[in-house]
Amino acid sequence: MPGIYLHIPFCKQACHYCNFHFSTSLKYKEEMVGAMLRELALRHGYLADKELDSIYFGGGTPSLLTEGELMRFFEEIGKYFTLRPGAEVTLEANPDDLAKEKIAALRRTPVNRLSIGIQSFFEEDLQFFNRAHNAREARACLEDALSAGFNDLTIDLIYGSPTTTDAHWEENLNIIFGYPIPHVSCYALTVEERTALAHFIKAGKSRPVDEEHAARQFEMLVSAMRAQGYVQYEISNFARPGHFAVHNSSYWKGEPYLGLGPSAHSYNGESRQWNIANNAKYMRALSDLSDLQDPPPGLFEIERLSPADRYNEYVMTGLRTIWGVELGRLRQMGAAFEPHFRQHIRPFLENGQAEQAGDTFRLTDAGRFLADGIAAAVFWA
């Protein structure tokens, strides 16, 4: 079933590693909410199925939305869609936003899952990342959210930072294991172009990211999560059985979704499109739609997916997950794709980085940290 993604493009401050689209000025937050509601009114027909499996508020920092602003979104979504019973409704939140009053307000909305960007429980890391919260708030928000009845939590952690020792990474994981957290997402610190971190490294103000350091902490992560009963159902995502993220799993499985807001992506199986990543231009395009029946020109770009595109996307996402790549799916895409995949995956089967079970191919522990490179090696050029 399909889902809706809403990109809330505002943050209190810029994290040094982040290259997502956002603004640190909240001046036009109310106008942005109105523009996104108008986009929903125009584009709700993009999804053929009107029963939703998930709603996901990402960003940016969606926890900057007020209770009233959130309810405006839910009311508008309810005009065009119904939520299936038990649907997942996730809101990304920063620890510094999750005061008890804010958590109580979120409990009055349909939000039933919080994705909390903790990143680390150590001040050295948080300061290096330029996060807005501190270590005390990182722990307090978990305790307050759980006490308020938010039992479906997922948290983000970052490993591989020059400031994160192996001992601190191990302690980060042990802290998590002390809470009943059903889902954890862990990402290697990556140096993205046009970020503060990239500038600092280039200027010699920060040590570069050490791939061996990150690989070692990834191995620590996989081992510790497995010992605690978590399933690594995607390279960076670990969950207790029954708590796989619906929104993320749908993306990896190629389910359709509608993205709303500046820079948001949408996918319907045949094409992929992405909205303009500029707040002012996005709002201007949606400013006066009284006479429009279709989205205005310039709101988004669209890419029609060829069979080769669909093959490459399926391989890229499939190899990252426990569901792997199924030969039956490849045959449906075209007769040439199965033999191509078999030929190019063979070296990784032989060196133990991939394995085959029936008609399904998956990466092993030895291959998962190299997933992107292995996928690229089996792409259709």
Image (cartoon, helix red, strand yellow):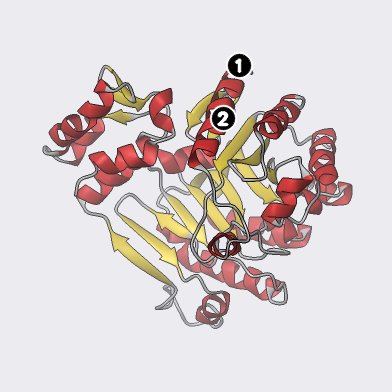
Name the residue type under label 1: Ala
Q: Nearer the viewer, mark 2 or mark 1?
A: 1
Label 2 element class: strand
Name the one closer to the observer, 205 or 178. 205
> Can you see residue 223?
yes
In primary-sequence order, the first of circles 2 and 1 is: 1
Asked if residue 216 lies left or right of residue 27, the reply is left
Q: Is residue 69 left or right of residue 101?
A: left
Taking depth in this image into account, of 191 and 209 the one nearest to the observer is: 209
Residue 260, horizontal then vertical, whole percent: 52, 62
Q: Are marks 2 and 1 in contact (CB under 8 Å)?
A: no
- Quarter of the picture containing the N terminus is top left
The amino acid sitting under disc 2 is Phe
Among all residues in the image, which is located at the extreme right?
A: 101
Identify the mark at residue 227; answer none if there is no mark. Answer: 1
Q: Which mark is residue 238?
A: 2
Question: Tag 1, which secondary structure?
Answer: helix
In which quadrant of the rendered view does residue 26 lie? bottom right
Residue 286 in picture, x, y percent from top left: 53, 77
Marks 2 and 1 sit apart, C-alpha to C-alpha, by: 12 Å
Expressed as whole percent of the image width and height from the top left, the position of residue 58 reads 60, 54
Instruction: Tell me which residue sits at (21%, 53%) in the image.
Output: 306
The number of discs equals 2
Q: Residue at x 42, y 31 (%)?
A: 368
Work out whether residue 233 or residue 222 is closer to the camera in this orientation and state it: 222
Q: Residue at x 84, y 37 (%)?
A: 148
Crowding around mark 1 (Cα neighbors within 10 Å: few <14, some 14 to 19, many 20+) is few
